[in-house]
Image (tube, grey):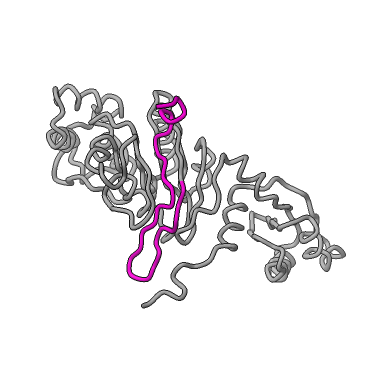
Amino acid sequence: MTAAAADTIIDVRGLTKRYGDKVVVDHLDLRVRRGRIHGFLGPNGSGKTTTIRMLCGLLTPDEGAGSCLGFDLRTQAASIKREVGYMTQKFGLYDDLTIAENLDFIARVYAIAGRRARVDATLAQLRLAGRRNQLAGSLSGGWKQRLALAACLLHAPQLLLLDEPTAGVDPKARREFWDQLHVLADHGMTVLVSTHYMDEAERCHSLAYIAYGKLLAQGSAAELIAQARLSTCEVAGAPALLMRIADAVRTHPGIRSVASFGAALHIAAASAADLDAALAPWRREEVMVTPVATTLEDVFIALMDGATDNVAGAAP
């Protein structure tokens, strides 16, 4: 095996999953390197969860091939499951067991040698030792998230697959969670995490954007912004005037996104010419137009606008 191959944790080509006439994941290609945090972004229903479930051996692809952790997706799913930590969107542990009891149960499922020592070490690693006897059902969202991550780490997996793990969690808990992910990545663990939060996307080493089952873009945050080649500006003025401008420029074919930020509009267009054309009728008004840097949110909204809905035309 070459060094490059050994460094690749996920390598899939043409990954496809159908439910009836609907193609949920459509010929997706994905490569993820060892020790990286790879963000998986896209709207609800875009196929992120289905992709994650195929990668960890819970679903069999209808088409496509590839490997996860060196194991074949189709023929070695059981081996993949033993080496992956999978954190679902919904808290899946037992509310009527304590933190320590939940982890001990998971350790028994995996038949972990020296499980009590391993549970204690994981409690310390995730700063849960002081709450070990607290019932899981009484925990806040942030602490439940931390417990779920601890359960994923007990069997020392090589890969973490995290499906929107911070949904409904407060900003402080989200930041602490991401700090922990970076510590794990620094020690060689690979993380594939789906998220809707742009601040989280910016903390990933690399990103993939999927919409309606199709992979639309891959790369680092800086690479995706550069590839999009959007021209972006901020328009400041009276609130009533800004509302009129927003309504008008949204109909211009070259405009990719319009959003209100406080007392200003943030407008992204396919080109500088499109931006100038959309704003030309308003130049004589009392507004201030300032070029600004394009954001990831601008890029993802533009990608969504160009995507084709995979539900349209499918049988009911």
Q: Outermost residue, front direction?
A: 1
Specify the quadrant that holds the C terminus.
bottom left
Q: Outermost residue, right direction?
A: 284
Residue 197 percent location from the top left of the image: 49, 48
Q: Is 35 covered by the magenta stretch?
A: no
Q: Is 17 covered by the magenta stretch?
A: yes
Residue 305 percent location from the top left of the image: 59, 63
Give the residues in magenta: 1-29
At a point 58% along the width and 57% down the height, the residue shown is 303
Residue 11 percent location from the top left of the image: 42, 41
Q: Is residue 161 left or right of residue 294?
A: left
Closest to the observer, 19 or 252: 19
Position of 196 relative to 246 (above/below): above
Residue 225 percent location from the top left of the image: 64, 45
At a point 30% along the width and 48% down the height, the residue shown is 88
The image quarter containing residue 2 is: top left
Position of 102 relative to 49 (above/below): above
At a point 14% along the width and 37% down the height, the residue shown is 109
Query: Would residue 282 be seen by someone viewing this image from the given angle?
Result: yes
Position of 184 relative to 297 (above/below): above
